[in-house]
Image (tube, rainbow, N blue to C red):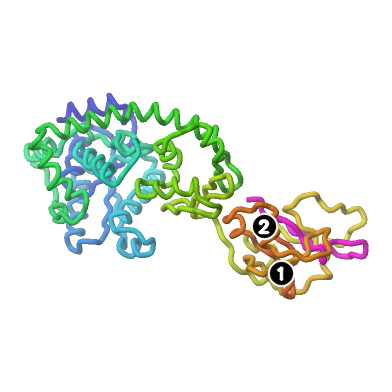
Amino acid sequence: MLDEFLKYIRDNKIINKNDRILLAISGGIDSMVMAHLFIKAGFEIGIAHCNFCLRGEESDLDEELVKKLASENRILFYSNRFTTSDYAREKGISVQMAARDLRYEWFETVRKENKFDSVAVAHNLNDNIETLLINLIRGTGITGLTGMKPVSNKIVRPLLFATREKITKYCIANHIAYREDKSNAETKYTRNKIRHLIIPVLKEINPSIEETLNETAEKLSGIHEIVTEYINEVRKKVSANKKEAIIFDIDKLKSLHISKAVIFELFRPFGITGTTSGELVRILTGRTGSQVFTRTHRIIKNRNEILVYHQESPGYQYFRINNIKDLSKTPGILSAEIMTDLADYKIPDDQYIACIDYEKIKFPLIIRKWEKGDYFYPLGMKQRKKLSDYFVDRKFSLVEKEQVLILESDGKIVCILGERIDDRYKVAGTTTKILRIQIKNH
């Protein structure tokens, strides 16, 4: 198996000769066999172990076994303990997802800090086909059917060639100590149901099902490369980046007569899955304001466009400003200053710079979200206008309206930050002091 291991690494250009590799070792059979192969092959390695503190003493015994392996072979050892259940509750995700997020984030930190070239994880051929079947059951595009990659950024998977049966035989032949996670035998998790209930039935039909599905995934991977190139060309034609949003032109989408499958692939990078793809198709023909939320993005229909926003875009709620110094430190404000030398000063033609008659405002100032019923006197107008009507005139999308901040003084709107000031606070011939505010251009 060592020869196969080295051949797979060479054929897939997984590791270079002088690379330093950080091994992710859980203490289970797959990772302990992987460690044994790396040691026998003579690579320069370190060992990293995550204790997720989910199985009490069992988790601690896993850590002790991995630490012993590192010590006996004089290998650098890194370990970390996580309060995984607490993290899952905080993020509103499953414990399994929390453990995945925590370990990969920590592995990358250790890799960078200690100058390792990549992180090796012990996914095997069976893990690969289980992932393929999970994606197929849940609904996926072609990407989900291509399986895991031997190299993905700084993560390498040098055991993808080996079945679980082959790994077990190698483990027994080489007397490799490992620990069994008892939860692997339970069938309450989707992966375990596939492993213990579905794969055995498929093997009755085709005894070589692992190899067959793996070959299918490899073929689909080649097709995926062709599809990806096509999707990227389509995306260039129908979308554009604007500030914090990606904008898709619905007319251009329609003119290309593209299928639902292509629509799915276009929006898949934004978290669209099989279960949310139907919602996406509906908002394409729906009314303005129709939207769908994914785990990472918010997708909204706005007139003849589809707007895609990242869910983590910053939002500001309410700030009480007692002086100019406080205003300068307010999120969204680049600078705020009082200007008194006005002889040669010319007000910039820049919507992100607001020049206000300082003597007309009263502290404390308020920066807040707009509310229904808010009105102001747009610069150059003597009649008041509701902000809601102003946004309609300016063709603001739902998200743009939600992100609007206003500056308020004594209960009156001084300006819409980054947009327009109120005519009542404009700089005039009698102005002796100017409050100059520069707003961040997002």
Q: In the image, is 374 to the left or to the right of 239?
A: right
Magenta includes 429?
A: yes
Magenta includes 32?
A: no
- Give percent across and percent down for residue 358: 82, 67
- Neighbor class of circle 1 (other Cα within 10 Å; few <14, some 14-19, many 20+) is many
- Give percent across and percent down for residue 305: 56, 45
- Give percent across and percent down for residue 126: 19, 39
Quick check: 183 above or below 157? below
Quick check: 323 above or below 292? below
In three-dimensional space, the C-alpha distance between marks 1 and 2, rounded to whole angstroms, equals 18 Å
What number is the disc on residue 304?
Answer: none
Q: How many marks?
A: 2
At numbered mark 2, what does the secondary structure look like: helix, strand or loop? helix
Q: Which mark is in front, 1 or 2?
A: 2
Q: In the image, is 394 to the left or to the right of 254?
A: right
Residue at 14 percent across and 51 percent down: it is: 179
- Depth check: give the residue in front, 276 or 207: 276
Q: Quadrant of the N terminus?
A: top left
Residue at 68 percent across and 64 percent down: it is: 406
At numbered mark 1, what does the secondary structure look like: helix, strand or loop? strand
What number is the disc on residue 408?
Answer: 1
Q: Please report the bounds of the magenta region as a residue range.
A: 419-442
- Give percent across and percent down for residue 399: 57, 55
- Depth check: give the residue in front, 164 or 35: 164
Q: In the image, is 386 to the left or to the right of 211?
A: right
Q: Which residue is mark 2?
A: 391
- Write down the quadrant of residue 421 in the picture: bottom right
Q: Amino acid at mark 1?
A: Glu
| Mark positioned earlier in the residue sequence (1 or 2) | 2
Q: Amino acid at mark 2?
A: Phe
- Depth check: give the residue in front, 36 or 233: 233
